[in-house]
Image: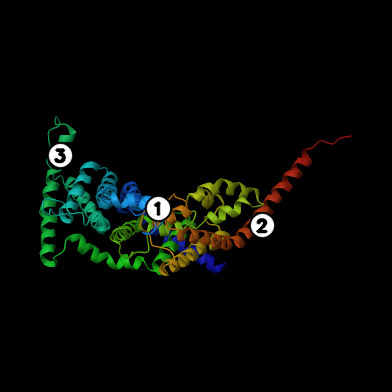
Amino acid sequence: MKLYDKLMNVVENTIAPLAAKVGSQIHVRAMRDGFITAMPFIIVGSFILIFAFPPFAEDTTNGFGRAWLDFATNNFDAIMMPYNMSMGIMTIFVSLGVAYSLARAYMMDGITCACLSLMSFLLICAPVTDGALPANHMGGTGIFTAVLTAFFAVELVRFLQKHNITIKMPEQVPPAIARCFEMLIPVLIVFMTLYPLSLFVQAQSGMLIPDVVMDLFRPLVSASNTLPAIIGALLLSQLLWFAGIHGAAIVVGLLSPIFLTNIGANTAAFVAGEPIPNLLTQPFWDFYIFIGGSGATLALAILMVFSRSVHLRSLGRMSAVPGFFQINEPIIFGAPIVMNPMLFVPFLLAPIVNAIIAFTAVKMGLVGMGVATTPWTTPAIIGASWGTGWTLAPVFLVVALLVIDLLIYLPFFKMFEKQLLEDEKKVADSSKEEAAEGTPATA
């Protein structure tokens, strides 16, 4: 118990306050909200990618598979166009979304700041070549640069407005036109700063700025694919949840640039027919580690459905369906798991075991790496298969992990159930005594 008290003291007094500050930091929130803005385009693009690459062998004799393969081959360019205009240019959506979210947080005009951000990004990442804008860095390789240029654009406008360095128009001028003139100075400053910087970097290194940025972040991206990094991230998420803080929102918000960078590189390799390079993607995080939500609580929901405790049985029936769709707040706050030492161990242990087994399975080639981003509310058994290109092996892995999670949760669930049954029995006995005392005597 002393160890538990020390751990809780560290979580409550050190980790939780620091994480709360990070999670509420305005740039972190803007980055998280900006990525959410881009998610519909990325998800639809991922679906199109799978449609263009049917999950059948080239020599299949299956009638449906043969027809699908032939159709995809004959119409490949037409099928891939929606992908190229969604996931293929996802950094454009990220640039707009992050800048807009940050500007709105500062109570500034979001549209003009988003446009300035996009112009800044294109200026240094997509120099016109032969009359066309190259899309090389509009996918995953431009994510970090898109975020940085979004921050730069918004902070530049904020600085100029704060110091009243702007072109003021008379009050009679319509607001939309006035905003246009206010943006003239920021646009000029971007041209005078980022563009010369881009030319200098190209002259010195022969690379564009996003290539240099990716080189700087490459150790971070590489480290994200290691088991210690994955376990460290999920431990932080679980500890925050246990303290009552939405750990998933904070940790996934910080991991989102890595998720998008990794999935972008994976899809590019998938389209090119090359080996898939990155293990840590959102499908891996959502559908292998956290089956049913943070803590892999779908197993706990299933156990609750068959509980002898009225409270747990009712909560299980209410939580099982949401848990199947990766939503587990009812269990986390209803059981509760928050600040509940009896369920703390399996809540922490189940995701770690899932991560180790899934990591090993992927490294051994038993299941494929993620090539598609799926909605996080997709049931794990479907999302895992979808994320790897509709392969079957992830389905078996998810089922195996769910069984293991059931075994991990079972002994702790039984102890918790026993405690609740005793409490419910005391309440029932007390109610009977009160009812007996209140019954009038009969002749």
Under circle 2, the secondary element is helix
Q: Which residue is mark 3?
A: 180
Q: Tell me the CA gap for discs 1 and 3.
A: 54 Å
Q: Position of residue 9 (x, y in %)?
A: 48, 63
Q: Tell me the CA gap for discs 1 and 2.
A: 52 Å
Q: Which mark is residue 218?
A: none
Left or right of 186 on screen, residue 292: right
* Few, some or many residues within 10 Å of mark 1 (<14, 14–19, 20+): some
Q: Which residue is mark 2?
A: 418
| Amino acid of disc 1 | Gly
| Amino acid of disc 3 | Cys
Of all residues, the one furthest to the right in this rendering is 443
Mark 1 or mark 3, earlier in chain = 1
Q: Position of residue 388 (x, y in %)?
A: 39, 58
Asked if the residue under mark 2 is in contact with the one under mark 1, i.e. CB atoms within 8 Å, the reply is no
Q: Nearer the viewer, mark 1 or mark 3?
A: 1
